[in-house]
Amino acid sequence: MIALLNEVADAEGAYEDFSVWGFRKDPWWWQHQVAVIRIARNVEIGLRFDLDGLRIKGGWTYPDPGQIPLFRTAVAAQESGPALVRAVETLERRGYEVTGDLMKRVPRGHDAGHPRADYLRYRSISAARPLGGDCAQHTPALPGAVLAAAEELEPLLSWLAGHVTVPGPRRAA
């Protein structure tokens, strides 16, 4: 996994902030290796190797409390909301499964008849799919497959990075 992520980062510098999750005693971890590439605060690309191959997932998970109102404001706005819908619909057409933490109803303060009411219910959102083929093995084609999938996820990830993160002071390295 680390070799794969290094090759992806070498090909595209925007993906150099990554981490690989360690092993635990739970048997699930013996058969899965998981890593994330950080795009912005809580906006990430996730990779998971298991016995079935490689799965990629991109999105916004485990939001900070202040991010949810930012997300809903951007979804409701006519200037930004339709772009999210286009990004999600494009990913669904390409075979991605779009999931997230959904409320049962449209949150208070928003009209249940809003054209993007279904999106206002999200408290996190991500799109995932298997990369298929022989991705269970690290072959020379694997970094290219990851980069191609990351490019497909880019409209969703850039929308999220631009709308759910608050610019703050940068820490010194």
Image: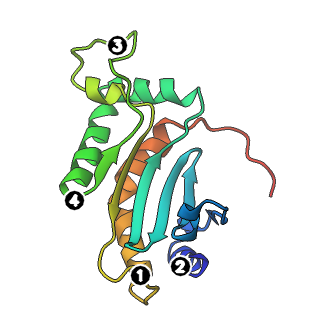
Q: Residues within 10 Å of mark 4 (few under 14, many from 20)?
A: few
Q: Residues within 10 Å of mark 2 (few under 14, many from 20)?
A: some
Spatial CA span between label 2 and label 3: 43 Å
Q: Residues within 10 Å of mark 3 (few under 14, many from 20)?
A: some
Q: Disc 3 residue type?
A: His
Q: Disc 4 residue type?
A: Arg
Q: Residue at x 38, y 86 (%)?
A: 141
Spatial CA span between label 2 and label 1: 8 Å
- For the view shown, which residue lies furthest in the bottom direction? 140
Label 2 vs 1, first from the N-terminus: 2
Q: Disc 2 residue type?
A: Leu
Whether 8 is drawn above or below 128: the answer is below
Residue 22 located left or right of residue 30: right
Spatial CA span between label 1 and label 3: 44 Å
Circle 4 residue: 94
Q: Disc 1 residue type?
A: Leu
- Whether tag 2 and tag 1 are in contact, CB under 8 A, the answer is yes
From where the camera sits, is residue 79 visible? no
Circle 3 residue: 110
Identify the secondary structure beneath mark 2: helix
